[in-house]
Amino acid sequence: MTELILTATAPANGGSVVARHDGRVVFVRYALPGETVRARVNDQRGSYWHADAVEVLEAADDRVASLCPIAGHDGAGCCDQAFVAPEALRRIKGEVVANQLQRLGGHDWQGVAEPVGDGAPTGWRSRVRLTVGPDGRAGIHRYHSAELVTDLRCAQLVDGLLDDLPEDRFRAGDQVHVVRDDDGARHVVCGGPRRKTRVVEGEYETVQRVGDRSWRLPVTAFWQAHRDAPAAYSALIAQWAQLQPGATAWDLYGGAGLFAAVLADAVGAEGRVLSIDTSRAGGRAGRAALADLPQIRLVTDSVRRALSDGGAAAGDAAEVAVLDPPRTGAGREVIDLLAATGVPRILHIGCEAASFARDIGLYRERGFTVEQLRVFDAFPLTHHVECFALLTR
């Protein structure tokens, strides 16, 4: 492979930094702005090259000894920013989001990624998915590779999450889901393509709590990875929604109804909350957890269909809509449909900076103004962020 001596400049979306070689842009992973590194080029296709820093020749002040013992250019792909001082990483994440918002959304914003909970960079992840290799051992993938690292000491994980896994019950090719729930119990569930899901430890359902409310949902269902995120995000939604008793709110891509519960508390018994998601498991969990709140209606459907003529939201004008779409964002069609409903207040969430920025640009084209915007370091030791925007018109 080609090796180059490169000096990094600005941070880029996705965990790389920008460098140049003979006028060509090279995106370098495992390096910091201002560093000079020896980098191994691993992709020379297209206009841009991609490389990994394999030796640091001139280090930045923000570089620290890796906080994850298994991460790095020759390790697992779990903690791709473990070599960055946590406060510096929050600043870099803010710079990346600001750049994406300006380039893709036409919106000027400056800030840093805020910590979630106590802000600890390690021990925050309470759920993980592993893959079982041909040797029957569970592992974490290397970055963009089918190769597995079977040393499971990832620094993100809560203490003991992967201790003494029952590997004698795993099968090659299994996907292994491990969750430490809010009752402190560990649950291990295996499955795979064309394989029936098997519980190998604990139960099939976990207990997740926010405030005085609890959810029971499958180990494989979506729930926030950071153990403090559900409570932190719920508090922000309650603050920004500004709903009055008797109002109507939409919870789009609502999962198990985490935000629906917050919205229901605000609109009261005389109000209405419509929660939409394609996940049947999430819907079942939400209906059970929120059975005491008759003002909530959970519908298993796509958001696009729900907002279309004849869909679940048709003829049911809302004062507030909360959207928490997948990494790819809501996109033009959904935002067009949402804007056409006349909803005046939108709380939009995004876990990928570029997709979030594109969605913000689409809202702005349709007459919405960004009233507030906050970015959270919900995935410490990684390049990932969680972004929240309050939009009004």
Image (cartoon, rainbow, N blue to C red):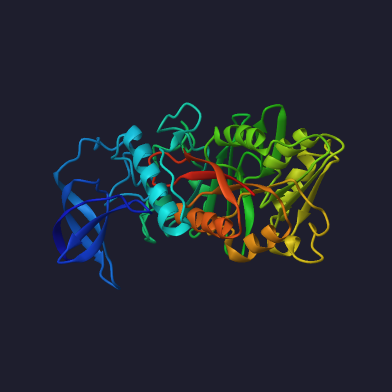
Residue 268 lies left or right of residue 328; in this view the side is: right
Q: Position of residue 59 (x, y in %)?
A: 17, 41
Could you tell whether 11 is left or right of 204 in the image? left
Task: Give 243 or 206, whichever is nearer the viewer.
Answer: 243
Q: Position of residue 260 (x, y in %)?
A: 72, 42
Q: Residue at x 77, y 37 (%)?
A: 264
Nearest the viewer among 255 and 1 is: 255
* Location of residue 120 (image quadrant): top left
The front one of 153 and 172 is: 153
Q: Is residue 151 visible?
A: no
Q: Position of residue 196 (x, y in %)?
A: 64, 58
Q: Quadrant of the N terminus?
A: bottom left
Is residue 145 shown above or below 320?
below
Query: From what the image shows, is residue 334 above or below residue 224?
Result: below
Whether residue 161 appears in this view of the structure is yes
Q: Position of residue 32 (x, y in %)?
A: 25, 45
**Residue 65 in which image quadrant:** top left
Q: Residue at x 76, y 33 (%)?
A: 265
Residue shown at 51% from the left, 29% from the top:
117
Q: Nearer the viewer, residue 219 or 267?
A: 267
At horizontal 71% and vertical 61% (from top left) the residue drawn is 340
